[in-house]
Amino acid sequence: MSSRRTDRTPSVSVGKIISEKSVVVVAGSGGVGKTTVSASLGLAASRHISGNVLVLTIDPARRLASALGIGIDGNEAVQVPIDGTPSNLYAAMLDPGLAWDAMVRAEASPEVAERIFANPVYRKIADTFVHGNDYAALGWLEEAMASNAYDLIIVDTPPSQNALDFFDAPERVAEFFGSPLLSWLTGGDGSFVGGAAAKTFGSLADRLLGSEFFADVVEFFTLMTAVVPGMVQRTSSVAAKFAGSDAAFLAVASPSNDLEQRLSRLAGSLEERDLTFDAVVINGVEPDVFANAKTKDVAERVIAGESSPLAKRTTELLAPGAEYVLERCAVAIAQRHAIERLPADAVATIPRLVHSPATTGALLALGLELWGEDL
Amino acid sequence: MTILDRRLLIVGGKGGTGKSLVAAALAELSAFRNQRTLLISADSSPGAAGMFGVVPGHDAIEVRRNLSVLQIESEESLSEFVALQLGPLGAVAGPVAKAFSFVAIAAPGVAELLLVGKYAHEARTGDWDLVVVDAASSGHLLGELAAPEGVAAIAPVGRLARETGWIVALLNDPEVTAVVNVTLAEEVPVSETIEFVERLADETPANLGAVVVNRARPQLYAKALRAELDEALADPPKRMSAGSRGLFEGVQIGLDRADVASAIDARLQAALPDSVPILHIPEFGDVDDIAEHVREALADEMSL
C-alpha cells in the first residue's frame, strides 16, 4: 500500500506522549483493534526506549498472541523475540482466574485460601460479577509494577461496554463485598443471624436454590470478608496510579460518522474522573488514494463512459471497479471530516488494510508509523 | 421457512459486528409481516431496543405497529422472579428480593438462568408471535444458554432448578428457538463465529438458525472479465495522470478486499452445516439511513 497516513499530521506525536509515561492505558469498545494497537506500540516502544517494555493483553486473537509469542499458559510475562533475537519487550496474556487466585493467596492465610478455592461459588465469581476481568488485570498489574522490572507498561484493557470500567473496578469490588446486606447476611462471625426478615430470606433461598448451595454462598462471603480489604487497597493504588500524571490514556476508535459524538461522550466521562485522553488512534481509515479528488474525478468519468485519459476497452473494463472506488471515495472523505472535527491534540490514524497485521514485522512497522517519527 | 417463522430469535456476536442493527432489522421485518413482535435488549447498553426513539425499560413499550421493545438486566429479572415466587408475601419482597439478588449474583448460573428464563417466558406467553433478543456477546451468551442445565446440575433440589425443564425444552426445539450469530467477512470475527458454533452445539441445548455476515464484500467482476482486468491492471499505461493511477490502485484494493472476503466466506461455509443459511449484508458507502439499508438487505437475503 503506497499511502499509510492520512493528510492530517498529528500536532503531537503519540510516541512522544508515551515515552514520557510509565503506563499507557489503551481503551475503546469491542472490535476496534485495541490489541493490535497495544502490540504495535509495544514493539515500537521497544525500539525507542532502552528499558524494558511490557504489553499486557487479555483474550487476544490467536494470531496476535502468536505474533507476540505468548502461549495459552497465561499470566507469565514472556520475552518477545524480534527478528529472531531476544528484545526488551515482554508480553503477557491475562488469565483472570489465576490472577484472582494470586490476589487471594497474597491476602489470606494458606488454610483460608484453600477453603476459598474449594468453595464452588468462588470459581464463578470472577466471570459472574461485573468488572471481574478488570479487577483481575489491576491485581496482576499491581504485582508487575511493584517488581520495578518495566520502564513502560502498555495495558490493553478488557473489552467492556464502558472503556472506563477499568478504573472503577476496585470501588465496585469494595461495594460488592462491603454491602450492609452482606454483613447482615453473614453476621459478624460468619453465622447467619436470626430475625424475621433473615428467616424469610433463609427459607426463600432454601426453596429457590437448595439449602446446601445457600450454605456455600454464605461461607464464601464470610471467608472473603477477611481477604477483600487488602485486595481493594492494592488495586486502588494501581487504579490511582493509572489515573495519575504518570499514565497516558489512549483511546482507540473506528472511523464511523458518529466518531465525534462517541469520543466526546468518552471525554465527558473521563472528565468526571479528572482525566483526559492524551491521544486518539483511529483504526481502519480508508487509504489516501480514496480521499484524492483526482481519483474520484477519473472514477466518475469512467463510470459515465466519458472520454477518460484511458483506452476505450480499459475504460469499459474499469467501470464496475470504478463504482466501488467512487463509493469508497465518499466514505474516505466523510471519515476525514469526522477526524478533523476531533478536539484531541494527538490523533493518529491506521489505514484500513487488506490483511490485518499479524506478524511481528507487520506490527512493528505499524507501531513505528503510529509512533509518529522514523527511526 | 425463514428464521422469522420461529418464536424466539437470540441474536449474538462479537462487539463491533453490528449485532444490534441486525436484531433491530429482524424485529422490524417481523412486524412488517404483521407478526406481533417483541424486541429485547439484554446487553448492558440500550442496544437494538434503543433504536426506535424511546428509552427502553423493564416494561414493553410499543414503538411501531406490531413492534414493542424492552430492556432487561439480570438484577431486574431476579427481583421479578422473586416477587413471583413470594406471592402473598409480597410485602417483604423489597429488602428480601434485594438480598436475594445479591446472593444470586454470586451463584453460578443463576443470573444467566433468569435472563434466559425471561426470553423463554416472553416467547411462551402468547402475547407475541416472535421475540427477538439483542443478546450479550458470544462468551456471555453461551453462558446464558448453558445456564438452565448448569443450575439444575449444581442445585438440583431448589425451586429454581425445577423451573429449568421447560426452558431447556423450549431452547432445544429448532422450530421454536434459533440462535443467530452476526459476524464480519474478516479473519478474526469468522474464527470466533466458527468457535461459537461448535461450543453452541456442545455446551447448550439451543440450535443455530443463521449466520449473518455483515459488511460483506461481493466480487466486483464476473470470472471472465476478471482475467482480462487483471491483465490490464498488471500492465498499466506507462504515462498516466495521478487520477488514473489512483483509480488503478483503488480498483486493485477493491479486488484484493473481495478476494480475501470470499476466501473467508468459503471457510465459514465449510464450517457450517448445510442447513444453516448464511445471510450477507453488503458494506455500504457513506449512507444516512444505515438501518433501512440493513433491513432491505436482510429481506432480500431471506427472499421476503
Image (cartoon, coloured by chain):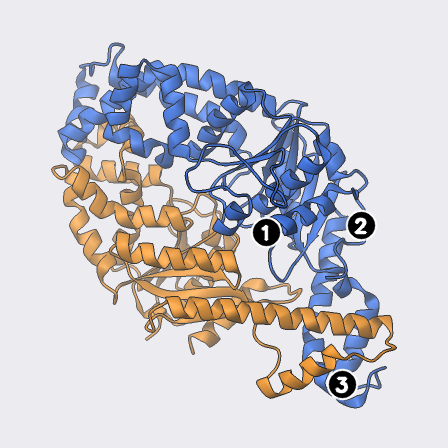
Chain colours: A blue, B orange
Q: Position of residue B183 (x, y in %)?
A: 47, 60
Report helix, strand or loop for mark 2: loop
Mark 3 crowdedness (10 Å alpha carbons): few <14, some 14-19, many ≥20: some
Give the quadrant of residue B122: bottom left
> Could you tell me the amino acid type at mark 1?
Thr
Q: Which mark is residue B211?
A: none
* Foreground of the two, B112 or A7: A7
Q: Position of residue A67 (x, y in %)?
A: 55, 48
Q: Position of residue B18 (x, y in %)?
A: 51, 57
Labels 2 and 1 positioned on one and the same chain: yes
Labels 2 and 3 positioned on one and the same chain: yes
- Compared across the picture, whether B56 is left or right of B197 comes to right
Residue at image mark 3: A314
Of the numbered discs 2 and 3, the one sitting upstream in the chain is: 2
Q: Which mark is residue A8?
A: 2
Whether residues under marks 3 and 1 lie with C-beta atoms below 8 angstroms apart, the answer is no
Q: Is residue B282 visible?
A: no
Residue mark closest to the camera, 2 vs 1: 1
Mark 1 crowdedness (10 Å alpha carbons): few <14, some 14-19, many ≥20: some
Residue at image mark 1: A359
Residue A362's place in the image compared with B32, above or below, is: above
Whether residues under marks 2 and 3 lie with C-beta atoms below 8 angstroms apart, the answer is no
Residue mark closest to the camera, 2 vs 3: 3
- Quarter of the image with the C terminus of chain A is top right
Residue occupying the point 34% across, 73% down: B274
Residue mark closest to the camera, 3 vs 1: 1
- Quarter of the image with the N terminus of chain A is bottom right
